[in-house]
Amino acid sequence: MTRNLLAEALGTLLLLVAVVGSGIMAERLAGGNIAVALLANAIATGAALVVLITIFGPISGAHFNPVVTFYFALRGATPWRTAALYIPLQVIAAIAGVWLAHAMFDLPVLEVSAHLRDGPAQWLAEFVATVGLLLTIAGGMRFAPLSTPMLVGLYITGAYWFTASTSFANPAVTIARSLTDSFAGIAPTSAPGFIAAQLLAALICWPLLAWLFDPNAS
């Protein structure tokens, strides 16, 4: 279990370094062009996910996401005892990743985001982003397990662009990104709506995807 926890912590930490660090770099180099900054942020995040899931998946399952852990626990694929260890660890590691990104770019380690992301459209976008993520994971594991890291990375890269929220789809990421006032930030007051939408998506996906990908279902 120690190896599992270390893999989950390192993977989550490095994911947030990629998300926040690439956002800071993109904002600095894009010359005010938000589209270019978002494209760079999306590509870096998707590429990092492919690598992190590939190397840590065989050890911890490479959840890096409380919603993924919650979904697998609901399915019975992850013991609830393991989920109870993974979820707080993911949140702590995500916050540490934000702080590490700040330190690398010579920013104040402790910040609070002022970037508001509020309203039903944003919450719907997070619901759609999270359903799509869980659909990608479940479908990949069912039909193309060796391709799952690539599928997840590609999905998140695309979802940065086709969702109004830029596809957080992860409560640990949401909490951690409330602690950066950089390009990737989300105001703490906006985070609860995102997290509620993400958890609702997991609850709906639990029976839906079990039926959809059941080889015996008609």
Image: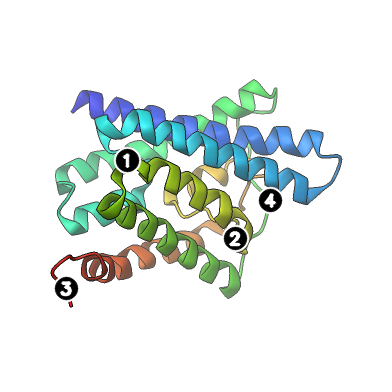
Colour setting: rainbow
x and y percentages locating residue 91 in the rendered image: 40, 41
Residue placed at 53% from the left, 36% from the top?
A: 47
Q: Residues within 10 Å of mark 1 (few under 14, many from 20)?
A: few
Which residue matches tag 3? 217
Residue placed at 32% from the left, 40% from the top?
A: 146
Contact between labelled residues 4 and 3, with CB atoms less than 8 Å apart: no
Identify the secondary structure beneath mark 1. Answer: helix
- Depth check, front residue: 62 or 193: 62
Q: Earlier in the sequence, mark 1 or mark 3?
A: 1
Q: Amino acid at mark 2?
A: Ser
Which residue matches tag 1? 146
Q: Earlier in the sequence, mark 1 or mark 2?
A: 1
Contact between labelled residues 2 and 1, with CB atoms less than 8 Å apart: no
Identify the secondary structure beneath mark 3. Answer: loop
Which residue matches tag 2? 165
Which residue matches tag 4? 114
Q: Earlier in the sequence, mark 1 or mark 4?
A: 4
Q: Residues within 10 Å of mark 4 (few under 14, many from 20)?
A: some
Residue placed at 68% from the left, 53% from the top?
A: 115
Question: Is 76 left or right of 88, judged from the image as shown?
Answer: left
Q: Amino acid at mark 4?
A: Ala
Q: Earlier in the sequence, mark 3 or mark 4?
A: 4
Q: Residues within 10 Å of mark 2 (few under 14, many from 20)?
A: many
Q: CA distance from mark 1 to mark 3?
A: 24 Å
